[in-house]
Amino acid sequence: MKNQSRRSFLKRSLGGAFGLILLPSIIPARLLGADAPGKKINVAQIGCGRMGRADMGSVLQEPLARVVAVCDLDSRRLAEGKKMAEQYYTRRGETDVNVRTYDDFRAVLAAPDIDAVVVTVPDHSHAYIAVAAALAGKHIYVQKPVTYGVAEAISLRRAVEAKKVILQTGSQQRSSRPWGSFRAASEAVRNGRVGNLQSIHIGVGIDQPSGRKPAPMPVPDNLNYDRWLGPAPEQPYMEGHVHPQRSLDGRPGWITTEDFGLGMITNWGAHHIDIAQWAMGLELGGPLVVESHAQFTPDDLRTVHSSYHVEMQYPKNVNVILDDKFENGLRFEGDEGWVFCARSEETVTASDPLAPGGRQVLKPLRASDPKILSALPETAVRWVPSRSHYGNWLESIAANTQPIAPIQQSARSLEACAIAWISMKLQRKLTWDAAKEMFVNDDAANALLARPARKPEYDCEVALKNAGIS
C-alpha cells in the first residue's frame, strides 16, 4: 500500500466481490480530499439496549468513527448509552466530552452533522427507522434480521438504492473476526472443494415455552411505549413482551413475541441462511420450494415458534434443511466430502444439542478431509477482505463502495427465513419465485409477505411515496 492511497485501495478491494458496483459520491464533502482517511464519520447510536450498547462498543473502537449522539425511547437506557460513550472517550484522555441524547430518532436524522446511524432496535422497528434514515441521506448499520418481513426488506432496498447510501447488515459471520470459520467453509464450498453440493444442514436453537402470558400492566414512566410499538399491532404493555426494567442486560421479551420478531427462524436463521446462500452463489437469489413444520404456544409468555423443521429446495437440487435438533452451525455436504462451520466450541443457545458428556466441544471448523480446507489458489473466488464488520462499513462509507453485507443480499437472506415462517404458519408446502419475490399462484401466502402498519407514520411504502420513490 506504499504506492497507493488508502482510499483507492479500498475502492478496488471492496468493490471487486460479486460484481458490486461503486456508487456515485454521496458522502459529506468534509470526508473527501487528500486527508480523507484522517477524518471522522459522525455516528449516532439508535437503540441503547443490550445489543445496542454492544454495537456501539464496537463502533467506538473504530478509528474512522466518532459517536456523537445516542437515542432511545427508554430514558434509563438512553442515560446508560450516553454514559458508556462519554466514559470511553474520557478514558482515552479527552475532556469536556458531550454525547448528545435524543428520545426521537427523527431528531437524529434531522441533525446535519450526523453522517451515519446504527439501528439496533427490536426487529419490528428496523425497517421504518432504516428507511427514514436512508431518505434522510444517512448511512446505516442495521442489525439482522434486516427487517421483520419481506415487503419491508424490499422497501428498504428501494430506499437505499434511490438515495445511494451505504447500508451494512449486522451479518457479522461474513467478516473475518472472530468467526473466520464461516468464511473458510463457505469459500471452500463456493470453489467446489466438496464437489457438487447436495445438501446443507443448518442448526439453530429454539425459544422454549416459559410460562403463561402475563397480564397487562402500567407503562413505566421512563418508556414511550406508543412509539416503541411502532408499526406492530395495538396491544397493552406487558414487560415480558418488551424488555426488562430491572436489568439493562437481560434478554428482552420482544425476541420471543411474534408481533415483534418471528422467532429463531429469522433471529438465528438470518445469520446461517445468509452464509448458506453466500456459499451457493445465490446471495441474490433464494429457494424454489419451502415446506416447514413448527410448534406454536400462543397462550405462553413466548408466542414465537418452538420446535421446528424446515426443508427448502434450491437451484441445482440443493436441499437446505433447518432443524432445532441439529448442531448449531452449517454442514455443507457434497458428493466429494463435507465441511462444517460454527461460531465456537461452546453452546450458543440454551437449547443447542450437546455432545456426549453434556458439553459441546466439537471444533467450529472441520471437514471430512483436511484438503477441503487447504489454501485456495489465486484464481479462486474469494470474499472481500474484512478485518472488522463495523470497520468494513465505515471504510465502505469513506471509499464509497458496497460493504460486505449490503441490503441487496441481506434482503434475500431475510426473505428465505420469512417464507419459511409463512410455511410454518400455513402448515404446507409453498413455491417461491425469487425473481419476482413472491409466491407462485398463492394469494394466502402472498398476503403474509406484509402486514399493515399500526399508523401511517410507520408505513415504509407511505414514506417512499412521500419521498417520490415509486
Image: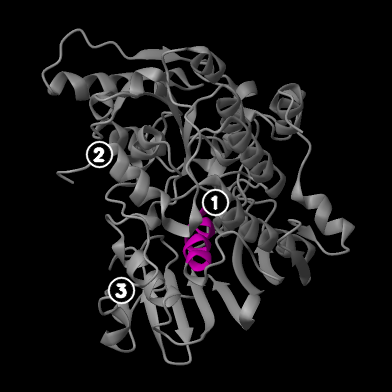
Tell me the SS state at disc 2: helix
Measure the C-alpha gap from mark 3 to mark 2. 33 Å
Badge 3 vs badge 2, beta-carbon distance below 8 Å: no
Taking the view exactly as shown, the residue that stands out farthest to the bottom is 336
Tell me the SS state at disc 3: strand
Q: Is residue 465 left or right of residue 277?
A: right
Q: Residues within 10 Å of mark 1 (few under 14, many from 20)?
A: many
Which of the marked residues, 3 or 1, is nearer the chain's N terminus?
Answer: 3
Q: Is residue 141 left or right of residue 364?
A: right
Q: Amino acid at mark 2?
A: Arg
Which residue: 67% across, 63% down?
420
Q: Which mark is residue 410?
A: 1
Of tags 2 and 1, the one toward the viewer is 2
Tell me the SS state at disc 1: helix
Q: Is residue 66 left or right of residue 293?
A: left
Which of the marked residues, 3 or 2, is nearer the chain's N terminus?
Answer: 2
Which residue: 68% across, 39% down?
155
Of tags 3 and 1, the one toward the viewer is 1
- In the image, the segment drawn in magenta is 267-278
